[in-house]
Image: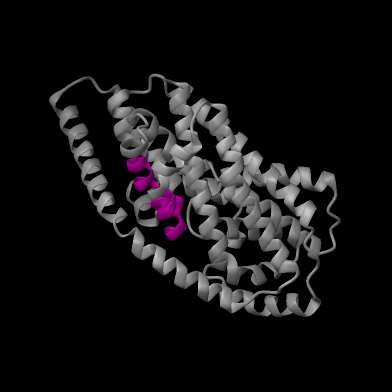
Amino acid sequence: MITTFATFGSKGSGRIFGRTLTYTLLTTFAAAAVGAILYVLIAPGNLSIDTVVEANLNQESEISNPLQQRMTYADHILSVTPNNIVKPFLEGNVLSLLLLAFAIGFGLSKLPESENKNVVVKFLLGLQELLFLLIRGLIWTLPLGIVAFSAQLSAQVSAGVVADSIGKYVLVVLGGNIIQFFVVLPLFLMARGLNPIHVLGKMMPAVLMALFTKSSAATLPVTMNTAEDRLGIRSKIARFVLPICTTINMNGCAAFILVTSLFVMQQGGTPITLGTILLWILISVISAVGNAGVPMGCYFLTLSLMSGIGAPVAVLGIILPIYTIIDMVETAENVWSDSCVSAMVDKDLQ
């Protein structure tokens, strides 16, 4: 973000951001809508009372950071605004880092040309090249990640889940992600005259890295490097669009929030009507846009929403043991969606 603004300035950034936001909202709404349709068609049933009670007893010991469930939107906004430069780096707060990067990059773009400005910009560009070099080495370790993922998947499956109701719930979540990944997003690409097979083939290292890290923020450097070097997206577009998409473009998270919220409310006796579904599509999209691209971000955000309306949050304790697999698939879908948005923006602004 810093090098993009410093090198290209703020000229044209409004058009890029506008198209990025448009594609982000369209794809996120589509993901939530697919999840809603599958939920109605598959119709997961209610859990037994004993299962919910047992989950309620085990939930506090399972959740690694239960304080996050009490975070309000006001707290979230305050946490995004940094009060010093060091804190966002120590906490890994992506939104705060983006605000700092925007301020520094915009400031450099407004500085008059001088030797001091050139030294700072060259230093940042050199750091970026070094980072990309390390990332190319990291990509070579992907085969080891595939083996580790296979072992983890086997362990998760062997742990077992509540077969009927939870099985249908998982089918809705993963089915929605698969449809969004292989059908909806490719349709968006084809509508803009892009070959989805070509785009996915070039962006596969980033998608696989997202699958293993479960964090679109941690995958961001790989996504940027892959988009520029393999897919051929212009640096001005990739380095502006992808950091923004990492923060606000959460297709998988929107589907998870919607389906999980409907499932939890259903366990509490709330009738799932068309009006309820439409309302929660809107809530899930807005919530996903404000979610952080970190592991289990969607889980804790959904927990906060359900706590706020008094729904039986103990149901989330049943989902938690299998959330690792869900989180992997969702993050891969998010990075794939980020790649699609950047490719479409680059195509539009050529």
- Seen from the viewer's position, the closer of residues 47 and 197 is 197
Image coordinates for residue 86, horizontal then vertical, percent: 32, 50
Residue 234 to residue 273: above or below: above
Q: Residue at x 41, y 69 (%)?
A: 148
Does the magenta portion include 208? yes
Q: Residue at x 66, y 67 (%)?
A: 316
Q: Picture quarter containing residue 163?
A: bottom right
The single residue placed furthest to the left in the displayed view is: 115
Q: Which residues are magenta?
A: 206-226
Q: Picture quarter containing residue 203?
A: top left
- Seen from the viewer's position, the closer of residues 208 and 109 is 208
Image coordinates for residue 23, horizontal then vertical, percent: 56, 32
Q: Can residue 84 be seen?
A: no
- Seen from the viewer's position, the closer of residues 183 and 45 is 183
Using residue 173 as the reference point, say whether residue 334 is left or right of it.
Answer: left
Magenta part, dominant SS: helix
Q: Residue at x 26, y 23 (%)?
A: 111
Image coordinates for residue 342, horizontal then vertical, percent: 45, 34
